[in-house]
Amino acid sequence: MRSTFFAALCTLLPLPALAATCGGDFATFKNALVAEAPDHGVQTLTAREFLQNVRQDSAVLRADRSQAIYQRPFVDFSRRLISNARIDSGRQNSQRHAQIFDTIENRYGVDRNVLLAFWAFETDYGNFQGDFNTANALVTLAHDCRRPELFRPQVFAAMELFARGDFDPATTTGAWAGEVGMVQMLPEDIIQNGVDGDGDGKVSLKTSVSDALLSGGSMLQAFGWRKGEPWIDEVTMPANFDWSLTGLHTQKSAAEWARLGVRPRDGGFADNLRASIILPQGRFGPAFLTYPNFEIYFKWNQSFTYVLTAAYFATRLGGAPVYNAGTPETALDGDQMRRLQSLLQQRGYDVGKIDGILGSGTRNAVQKEQIRLGLPADAWPTPAFLTELERS
């Protein structure tokens, strides 16, 4: 999900006078969207026709609330998503669509393995694109008060696509969160970055491999992807390292990390690039060096675990070895993680929603508390750490 931009935008710009607020009666909400549509360049008649048969979808809300897979630690999560079959299919697709990937790399500078990884994780190379009615999903999530700032703009973008003849509110389907096509793009992304790769005059993200992949490459370039640069390397860490230096908030050149004893596990470093050390499961688990392109992944998806898995999988498709899982300390279960987040929130930390997911806000807070308590500051919360925090 790509929510950061829209959330920031909505804090800076006032909503139009007739803006539809979230919640309340669903029919009334739809009427308010119709009234607001002209402020977004959508004719009232178009908006009314688009919304005529849209209904609230409780299955979408259940899916939005039930993302337990993101509570899994990196090793478990990545092993569930990455299989030999997916690697083999990725390499076969790389060969089968070599000309398309050549075009993407030349035009947008995006490595084919990066797009292959997203294609695999989003829809299993186009085989499972979702069967939720997209109009219902978008309006349901705009009406819901959890993240309306993300989904309201997507509703009007879908209306624009409808006006162009590129979206049918009755038949367009995709993921529960409103993404459409082989690489799962939201309506605004389609408007801004959709590409007619096969030259048939349409942007067909569900049925055209060239349209879908070129559109994905265009979107990554728009997000800021840097041509010819790596995104992640697996590393080995010295035992006496200052763990408080780890995390995305600390950057040094790869050469500086090397002088501190950090070593590439396979190949070499991009010595001149700024980079961070991330330890998804603490100092006893896997370790990675992340470059500026890694940050672009978060504009595609906000989940730390998903992003790291997708970035690592792209290196696997390129021939990197299986990461060294190490022997990570025991993870917190969902209830323990929620208790930890509540404690950190009470101490003044911004950990976002109390959802049992170890996101960047929770990681940063854990690391600061580890420093305060004189513990190895690797940002990995264990049951022993939780007990220590409850006592302090």
Image (cartoon, rainbow, N blue to C red):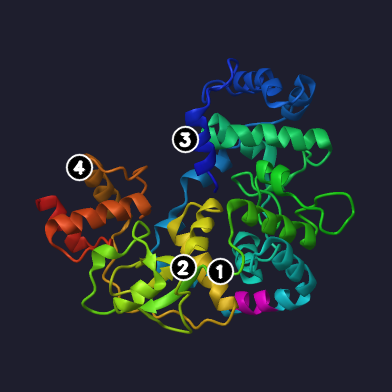
Side (left or right) of 355 relative to 148: left
Image point (44%, 58%), residue name: 304
Judge whether residue 169 can be spotted in this image: no
Which label belongs to residue 229? Answer: 1
- Magenta stretch holds residue 144: no
Q: Earlier in the sequence, mark 2 or mark 4?
A: 2
Closer to the camera, 336 or 103? 103
- Camera-side mark, 3 or 2: 2
According to the picture, the residue beneath numbered tag 4 turns out to be 347
Q: On the image, which quarter does residue 118 sit in?
A: bottom right
For marks 1 and 2, give the CA distance.
9 Å
According to the picture, the residue beneath numbered tag 3 turns out to be 146
Closer to the camera, 315 or 223? 223
Q: Which residues are magenta?
A: 85-91
**Where residue 91 sits: x, y (%)?**
67, 78
Whether residues under marks 1 and 2 lie with C-beta atoms below 8 angstroms apart, the answer is yes
Query: Mark 4 packing: few (<14 Cα in 10 Å), some, or many (20+)?
Result: few
Type of the residue with mark 3: Arg
According to the picture, the residue beneath numbered tag 2 turns out to be 273
Q: On the image, which quarter does residue 26 sit in?
A: top right
For marks 3 and 2, give the CA distance.
38 Å
Image point (66%, 64%), residue name: 109
Closer to the camera, 286 or 295? 295
- Camera-side mark, 3 or 1: 1
Type of the residue with mark 2: Leu
